[in-house]
Image (cartoon, rainbow, N blue to C red):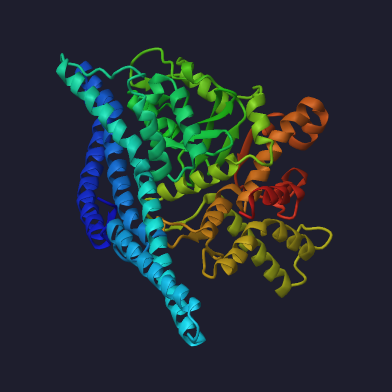
Amino acid sequence: MGIKMDLSASNTQASSVSEASQGRVTAYESALTSIDSFSSERELKGQAYDSAQTYAKGMFMPLFQAAMLFEEGLTESVNNLPSRYTNEVSSESLDQDTLQSQIDAYDQAIVAQQSALDEADKRIGVSVTTKESIQSSIDMIQSKRDNLQQKLDKLITFDANSPSIFDSVDSLKSALSQALTLMTENFASFNGTFILPSMEKMEWTQEVNKQWLMKKRGMNEKQAELALEFYNSLPQEVRKYVTVDDIEATDDGFVMLNKPFSEILKAMGKTEVDLGGDIGVKPVDEVYDDHFIYGVRNGEQFVFSILKMRESGDSVGSSGVSIPFISTRLDSLFTFSDKDSRITTEDYFFNEFQRIVDDSGQEADSTLVNYFKKTESKAPYLIADVYTNKLIADNSGQNTFSSEQMKKLVAKINQIDEVIEEIQHNPTIIYPYSPSPLSSLYIEKSKLSRIPDYLNSLNNQAGYQIYNPDTGEVTIKDPQNPTHYERQALLAINTANVNYNSFAAEVEYHADAIEDWVKNNWISNFVFNTKERAIRADMALGEESESGIEDKYYNLEDSSVQSQKEAHGEL
């Protein structure tokens, strides 16, 4: 029996599979939500609950992820079958046996017609018209025969290649099979607590996680592999509280968690921190909610540090981003003096955290510096994206954004405008500006207007109002799908960098300054005042002017910004 392709039946099958799979995918999504809620529930106490939560996160979560990916992949493959057939073979149903029979019939007809033509050539008196008619008939039959042969060849080729359409689900099918086998074994030997199988037996989760990152998170293969390496390198006491969904990665060696320290600490049972002095005790959500683990790959290992991304209106500081070039060891970072829910100044974690994010007199890590000093480094662009996502997520669903720094900047510009207007209406008034009151005021206003001027131009580029010059506020049409113009505006009012290229140039400038400090201490001191301003790349907006020798990255025509543009495009 030959190959058959019933296109109508294939389309019907694709529709039926899609409908059935969608129902199962919805059920799997619900299951994953429940697993996530159960795994992160902190009110459940005791060894049995701890083991159940660990098992749910380690076994059930990748199992249902694999099931979801399998269903979605199967649906895609089944739909691809008739689609690829139509594109590669024909828009009609075909049967190999029928095609071959028709081809054979045409071959016989061609032989018969060729015999007639040969006989006509032998006879005297057969007209040229008759011979041409026979040849025309042969050509017509041959054309029809060739057309059928072409369809048959395509059908055979498609049949040989069609199994590859389902290649993407084969590995997931294998992972599901391994997972179900392990679960059967686990439940057969259950003795009151759940125990995850060995890492070797859980190898199937690596493929599931990789495909999950690529299909659900949009990572390319290199990013997904790096994210998994990063996840596997995390200490167990951290890894048990995060998933691969909590990871962001570039494809050039930079990875970070998008889950803040506060969430990890709360999962560990740490809900408060005693800051000492007049500040006293604060919830970890107030102190550690803006800090994130990041890493840069160095050979087979990662060098870790702590990144700050603070939104406007934060209780412990102004908005902005800080990238320390100071490394820490994650395997010892989360060390506490006791199991109490309160972090104290006696805890190693407290002091090591402060050393990274705040303390003076620290040494930069060469791996971090060397990565960030490269113009080609992609981390600043990822960080800018993650930061603007955080600003949106922390805005309680509102689509209007502001920052205290931007409000102060706009207020100061308005104040200068009022003084200028007053002087123009009353030229005899004397103000303490020299040599010319108006000249000094216009210069000061020009310095302060860098960001507002750019945001006004951004309105023109976007074709709608993102920035309100009267209030200094930024409005995003759809917080679920911000445009790049809107992201630029958010970045500007919180970091003083009007676009991603400027943001990246500032990060690079700080990393370069570390090397300048080492090579020529006095030059770095002249530019930065102290080494401390270089060892952490701090991007923030102040109400004063951002002009000066150390602020060249604010000038979009500066070579540092232009180099970023050439390397990454205008962003």
Seen in the image, is 516 located left or right of residue 209?
right
**Residue 80 pos. (x, y %):** 35, 54
Q: Is residue 492 above or below residue 372?
A: below
Q: Quadrant of the C terminus?
A: bottom right
Does residue 430 sit above or below 386 in this rendering? below
Question: What residue is at 52 percent from the left and 36 percent from the top?
Answer: 308
* Residue drawn at 38 percent across, 44 percent down: 164
Q: Is residue 248 left or right of residue 299?
A: left
Q: Is residue 84 something one can see in this rendering? A: no
The x and y percentages for residue 210 are: 41, 35
Q: Position of residue 46 (x, y in %)?
A: 21, 18
- 204 vs 447, nearest the viewer: 204
Return the residue nearer the eye: 222 or 234: 222
Instruction: Name the residue located 76 percent from the left edge and 60 percent from the top edge.
Output: 443
| Left or right, residue 194 beside residue 418 | left
Q: Residue at x 53, y 24 (%)?
A: 354
Residue nearer the viewer, 180 or 253: 180
Task: Answer with left or right where residue 311 lies relative to residue 30.
Answer: right
Q: How many marks?
A: 0
Q: Position of residue 376 (x, y in %)?
A: 66, 41
Q: Nearer the viewer, residue 377 or 162?
A: 162
Question: Residue pushed farthest front?
Answer: 124
Observer able to see residue 554: yes
Kindly indicate the quadrant of the structure image that contains residue 28: top left
Q: Quadrant of residue 444?
A: bottom right
Give the answer, above or below, for where 291 lies relative to 332. Answer: below
